[in-house]
Image (cartoon, rainbow, N blue to C red):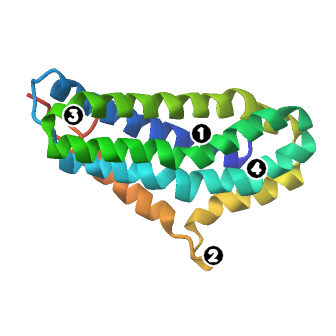
Amino acid sequence: MAVALTIIRDEHRALASVLKGLQYLLDPVHSGRQKPDFALMKAILAYIEHFPDRLHHPKEDQYLFPVLRERDPSVCVVLDELERQHHSGPDVIARVAQAMRDCEANASQLASLKQAVDDYADFQWSHMRKEEQEILPAAERALLPADWELIDAAFKSNNDPLVGVERQQEFRELFRRVVNLMPAPMGLGPAQG
C-alpha cells in the first residue's frame, strides 16, 4: 500500500478524534453539568483550524487529485466537490470560532456553539467518508507505482526540513496537548465530574 494512503487515513482518524473530543467536551456543558473549558476548546479549535488547511488538504489538492484526474476521469466530479469543500472548510470552521467567541462572551450562546460544532463535524465526516470510500479506492486501482512515488514523497515531506515544512511536529505537539487536556475517557486528563 502507498505510504500516502496510510498518512491520509491516519490524519483523518486524528481529525475525527479531535472533533469527537470537542463534541464530547460540549455534552456536559450543554446539559448544565459542567462549566465550559474554553482553554481546552480553543486548543482543539486551533488544531482543527490549522491542520486540514495547512497540512492535509494542500497535499491532496496538489499531488493526489491531479494525478487521479488524469488516470481515472470518472472521479472528476467527486474531486471537484472535494476541492470545493477544501475551499469552503475555512468558512465553516470560522463559524465555529465565532460561535465559540460568542459563547465565551455570553453563555446563552452555548446552543449555537454546539450546533456549529455539530455542523462542522458532520461536514468533515461526510468529506472524509467520500475520500475514503470513493477517492482512495479509485487511487489504489488507477495510479501507477511512479505516481505513488511522487505522492508518497509529498506526504512524507511534512517531516523534511529541507523543504522547510516542519508542521507535522507542530500538529503532533498540539494533538498531544489536546489529548493530555481532554478528560478521560476521550483523553488523558482527569475524568469529568
Name the N-terminal-most of marks 2 and 4. 4
What's the amino acid at mark 2? Val
Name the N-terminal-most of marks 1 and 3. 1
Name the N-terminal-most of marks 3 and 2. 3
Depth-wise, is mark 1 or mark 3 nearer the camera? 3
Location of residue 157 with respect to 19 vertically, above or below: below
Q: Name the spot of residue 138 as percent of width and height, x first.
A: 81, 33
Depth-wise, is mark 3 or mark 2 nearer the camera? 3
Q: Name the spot of residue 18 as percent of width and height, x first.
A: 38, 39
What's the amino acid at mark 1? Arg
Q: Name the spot of residue 68 as percent of width and height, x first.
A: 84, 44
Pointer 4: what residue?
64
Residue 190 in view of the camera? no
Please identify the quadrant where the N terminus is shown.
Answer: top right
Pointer 2: what residue?
163
- The structure residue drawn at horizontal position 75% and vertical position 40%, both measured from the top left corner, is 80
Location of residue 148 with respect to 32 vertically, above or below: below
Pointer 3: what residue?
109
What's the amino acid at mark 3? Gln
**Rounded to the nearest whole Å, what is the CA distance between mark 1 and mark 4?**
14 Å
Q: At numbered mark 2, what does the secondary structure look like: helix, strand or loop? A: helix
**Rounded to the nearest whole Å, what is the CA distance between mark 1 and mark 3?**
34 Å
**Rounded to the nearest whole Å, what is the CA distance between mark 4 and mark 3?**
40 Å
